Image: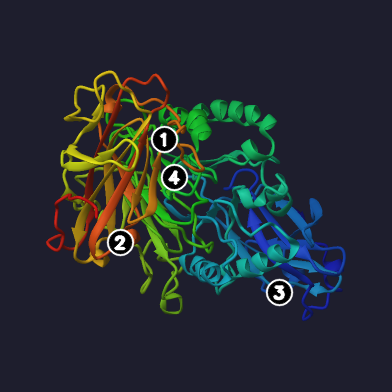
Amino acid sequence: MRPVQFAVLSMLPMMAFGAVDSYRVCWRTDPAMSMVICWNQVSGSEPEVCYDTDDHARKAIDYRFRQKPDRVVDYRGMMNHFVRLENLQPDTAYYFVICDSEGVGRRLWFRTAPATKQPFTFITGGDSRTNPEPRRRGNRLVAKLRPLFVLFGGDYTGSGRPEEWAEWMEDWQLTISEDGRIFPIIATHGNHENADLQMMDKLFDTPHIDQYYSLGIADELMRIWVLNSELAYGDAARLPEQQAWIENDLPRYPETTWKVATYHRPMRPHTSGKREGINRISAWAQLFYEQGVDLVVESDTHMVKRSYPVRPSEEKGSYEGFVRDDRRGFVFIGEGSWGAPTRPTDDDKPWTMASESFHQYKWIQVHSDEMLIRTVKFGNVDDVEALSEENLFDEPTNMVFWEPESGKVLRLPFSVKHASYHEPSKASVLVELGQTWDWSLDGEVWARGQAPLGYGDSQVCTPIVPDNAKPLYAFFQGTFSLDDPGAVTRLFFDVLLDDGCVIKLNGTEVIRHNMSKGDITSESLATKRVSSWREKQALPLPVAPKWLRAGVNTIEARVHQCSLDSSDLVFDLSVRVKSPTTNNCSTQIERAL
């Protein structure tokens, strides 16, 4: 820190505002002792930051310290200036103005992180993108919640064009509180930033040019590991460096109380239109489990989810590479929706605790003995009462929180016995396994039999071919009746299957499992073999309730083998729903007419 040269500052026009905008603050090094002040220099010259632990409003001459930019980047239509302040005092308010040849800018202030294990709050979310109104509502709520920082999960704009970033930066100013407090942003790279893999570095002066790094908060009360899921799509040659780094860095902090990992694209998205994160599971899931990661924050899908604690597993009872483990598992939360168009929650897992679709982010309170996670809905913004520096852990009056069946607060460490958790109601079974279905080998000639149907497997009740025949595929169909589809909030088809299938509900494809994209023909094969315990366990596959209709509902399934020499084919299906009442549903399967 250098004392201000009063002779220089005394010449500034005190009442003229400097021509700067797009304020933001970030961290590159220790959050307790540093801050990067960032802005766009619209005009003027010789800018510098004047700062102090005392508030001198816009009277620049009274600020004791000043610093010129450490870095200037002409990028995306902005002249981005970065001043890297170091050797600051922990848990301290710093007031600052930006002075240039044209005047003095707005007085703002930030708070450094504590250097001891003191509780704090933070916000995490992502995918603000192309819907400015919900984005602005969320930003205004940041100002009222007054978090220590914001962990942003990527996909800030639609494509990263200059005009998009100008609008995003203008909207970000809404996060500044009424008293001028500005909150640090920890930036993650998303797929909508893939036009330039160094975009975050040029806009937020991040700690690593390839957007993977870790930051410890409050004397390792919490550490965040930021990873870049987009290297796999934009510069795969750099993936080994990131992998070597995370494998080395995670074990360096065994005493950290809360370990949080974040990246943009999910391992297992909770909407069916998104690609599965197989490579991310392979690279990170077991590592997270072995190193005791507590919370994994994902974005990209534009919906809301929270999971039970899980660990990577292919054992009996697992699903899509994970099994519930309340004792040692890590929890997934996400997935974006800070303003991007919302997507349906039509891909829940058996280990999903709750999911829904609306604009939101997470407000998280971090204590030494617990982490409390609430989901903020972007409603009622004008009526929400802002928090103050004295009540940062209170729920703001009139704030709208998500309250799924499992409870408003997700508490870590998780326990079903804790008062914060409410056991969700079980889905009611409308159609049991083992019912009678129609079947056909060509879609023309039909017969009827009790499920499981198929051949070559001891659990088959109704063989559909002579002993030595092994057709590549078969068709199955049936109906069930429903009086009030509008009352159904969740719909599941539990499918016993060997090997792959395409299932339609009332003529619309709602499930494609273990089958490739594109048209399904008589020569199509399942993408992989189903074996071991998976042949005996029905898969709980979510279906969007919007495809239900009042009266008769028709299910059509087409099951395919994975190879020409496969020895068995199996099909059975049950239907489960969640609804305020299921008394209006009939449970028989009968011939589709």
Whether residue 469 is situated above or below residue 377 in the rendered picture: above
Q: Which mark is residue 514?
A: 1
Q: Position of residue 330 (x, y in %)?
A: 38, 38
Q: Is residue 534 left or right of residue 449?
A: right
Give SS at disc 2: loop
Quarter where residue 310 is shown: top left
Cα distance between the residues tagged 2 and 1? 34 Å
Whether residue 411 is visible to the viewer of this picture, yes or no, is no
Q: Is residue 585 visible?
A: yes
Q: Amino acid at mark 2?
A: Glu
Question: What is the CA distance from the residue labelled 1 to the residue labelled 4?
Answer: 48 Å
Between disc 2 and disc 1, whose residue precedes?
2
Q: Counting other residues with Cα less than 10 Å from the Cα at mark 3, is it few (<14), some (14-19), or many (20 or more)?
A: many
Q: Are marks 1 and 3 in contact (CB under 8 Å)?
A: no
- x then y, percent, for residue 78: 78, 62
Q: CA distance from mark 4 to mark 3?
A: 34 Å
**Residue 431: which numbered mark, if any?**
none
**In the rendered image, which quarter is residue 394 located in?**
bottom left
Task: Pick whichever of labels 3 and 2 is earlier in the sequence.
Answer: 3
Q: Secondary structure at mark 4?
A: loop
